[in-house]
Image (cartoon, rainbow, N blue to C red):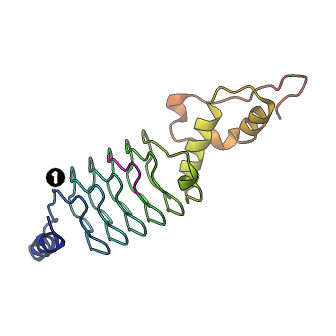
Amino acid sequence: MTRAEVEAIIKTARERMERPDLRRADLSWADLSWANLSEADLSGADLSGANLSGANLSGADLSDADLRRADLSWADLSGANLSDADLRRADLSEANLRRADLSGANLSGADLSEADLSGANLDYSCWPLWCGSLGVKVDKRIAAQIAYHFCRLECDTPEYIQARNAILTLANQFHRVEECGKLNGIEMTGGNENE
């Protein structure tokens, strides 16, 4: 599907006061940079390799979408549904993901540098542990979630135990602590105890 075809679908839907329907559309490698796709239904769409840099996808439904290697840098994805989306190796640098639902999303290798994930739902998603996830803006909820997962690691080095015990208060504010269990401090071996 070409950019012109996408823009025609969006224009027609908006004239009819309907949500643009692009469900399961093949938009792989399409250039949709700076396009206004807000509130569009792109669930199950193939957007692999697509250029969506600077696009307005606020409130869009991208659940189950294939966004592998898509360029979403500077995109507005605030309030978007990205549940179970495949975002492997996607460029989300400086993207606005505030209040986005990323539950179950695969973010392996995604570049999240300088992205804003405040208020986003990351439950059951795959957080990338590489330099591309450094500098991500998060809120206290996500910080507590990441701290909780860090504190659940099995590691007996004194440096880890000291760091773990230092962030335990934050970790126990994880929104699913009742389900996963409250964490307690670990005593340091060699006579040192946690505070």
- Give the residue at mark 1: 24
The kind of secondary structure element at disc 1 is loop
Q: Is residue 15 left or right of residue 111?
A: left
Image height of 44 relative to 182, above or below: below
36 part of magenta stretch: no
Residue 173 seen in render: no
89 part of magenta stretch: yes
Q: Quadrant of residue 114?
A: bottom right
Image height of 44 relative to 2, above or below: above
**Quarter holding the N terminus?**
bottom left
Taking depth in this image into account, of 165 and 92 the one nearest to the observer is 92
Residue stretch rendered in magenta on the structure: 85-90
Residue shown at 74% from the left, 25% from the top: 156
**Quarter holding the C terminus?**
top right
Main SS of residues in magenta: loop
Image height of 18 relative to 132, above or below: below
Q: Is residue 114 left or right of residue 44?
A: right
Residue shown at 63% from the left, 30% from the top: 153
Which residue type does callout 1 highlight? Arg
Residue 85: image location, x then y, percent = 32, 48
Residue 124: image location, x then y, percent = 42, 38
Taking depth in this image into account, of 46 and 125 the one nearest to the observer is 46
Residue shown at 55% from the left, 56% from the top: 138
Residue 21: image location, x then y, percent = 14, 61
